[in-house]
Amino acid sequence: MTDKLSNRINNLPVSATLAMAAKARKLKENGVDIIGLSLGEPDFNTPDFIKKAAIQAIDDNYNSYTPVDGYGELKKSICNKFKRDNGLDYESNQVVVSTGAKQSIANAIQVLINPGDDVLLVAPYWVSYSAIVTLAEGNPIEIRSDISSDFKITPLQLENAITRRTKLVIINSPNNPSGSVYTEKEYLGLAKVLEKYPEIYILSDEIYEHINYGVPHFSFAKIPSMFDRTITVNGVAKAFAMTGWRIGYLGAPYWIAKACTKMQGQITSGANCIAQRATIAALEAPVSEIQYMIDEFKERRKLIIDLLNEIEGIKLNEPKGAFYVFPDVSSFFGKTIKGKKINNASEFAIFLLEEAHVATVTGEAFGSPNNIRISYAASKEKIKKAISRIKKAIKD
């Protein structure tokens, strides 16, 4: 019956991360012991001080519709956070609170992109960027990088990708899926190119900003020439272990923020009232309150890198942020393992799921066809067990 559906939905791909999670769940339901390393979801509980704020909000009878762009108190907290952590001066009318950073990204793309506009995706990129651009009838254009460049693009690559149709560039640091972190100097190099094209806007996804290991986070909008052209997107899902609370936000030029509020008013209206009150507590707390999670991720990063480096054929770099490794597995392409021919990263990921019972995600979905993404947002015990299974499975 797909012929009865709109072309819009028929042309929209299923999220690769969610598709792999669904396959893993189906195997689990059939009694298979699957270790899930496909989703980008911290395995920590939401910190108690945030939960207490939510309980207080319930007791205080926060149960009515919220303003479309978010509670004024929360927007003030977001402005203070932008100033404290990023050196950015946003006013409350430049901030929009949404149902997750994904909606913030979708709002911005919907209000900026016309049919036929080109949107440059700095690859590897989060899987949903391309789909959201397609939904807005824009053209997703990849600028590829690989492990040899630490999964970062150069100013020359950016320059060569720009055309008269380019409207938006989407950047993401710390990066999902590679974990790479752009330095201030590297971003300044990209900004120097963009200064020549004032009609191009930038969407900077900074959801992993606090999860970094030694390279200071730098916000693209902090570059003076870029501030009035940049939409800064963030949220509480990753750093505060609040994935299910679904609160994201953006800071942008007023006219873009106003348009995003208009868009959101016709789609979902305001975000959940209790989650918004809890987010105030999260953002007003010092970053030191969540340092224990970052420290644990850093230990897990070392563990998974050490274990994967023991497997011949897997090529790794050292990610400086987020909670993913993004190994190059192209050495396995064309080989037959356990009677199964591996032609690409997607088949390799399926092989790991079926033979090692470990769920990962193909790099093809992120614009990097030689790689797979492995999340280490899981316990050390699960990581050890998963990599042991992978090592055994590919040893033919």
Image (cartoon, grey):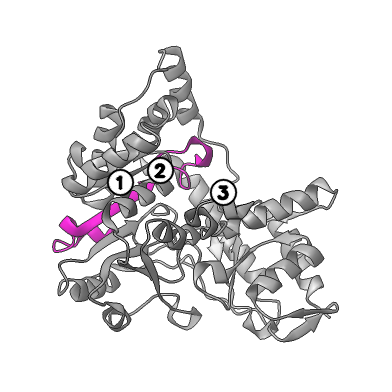
- Give the amino acid type for the residue marked by disc 1 in the picture: Leu
Q: Which residue is mark 1?
A: 250
- How busy is the neighbourhood of tag 3: few (under 14 within 10 Å), some, or many (20 plus)? some
Does the residue at mark 3 contact the one at mark 1 (Cβ under 8 Å)? Answer: no
Q: Residue 284's spot in the image, x, y percent?
A: 33, 34
Q: Compare marks 3 and 1 and give the one earlier in the sequence.
A: 3
**Disc 3/disc 1 C-alpha distance (Å):** 21 Å
Residue drawn at (34%, 36%), measured in percent from left and top? 266
Q: Compare marks 3 and 2 and give the one earlier in the sequence.
A: 3
User: Residue placed farthest to the front in the image?
Assistant: 4
Q: Is residue 328 above or below residue 67?
A: below
Number of residue marks: 3
Give the quadrant of the C terminus. Answer: bottom right
**Disc 2/disc 1 C-alpha distance (Å):** 23 Å
Q: Which residue is mark 3?
A: 41
Q: Is residue 183 above or below residue 99?
A: below
Highlighted range, magenta: 218-247
For label 1, the SS is strand
Q: Which residue is mark 2?
A: 288
Q: Residue 392's spot in the image, x, y percent?
A: 81, 71
Q: Is residue 376 visible?
A: no
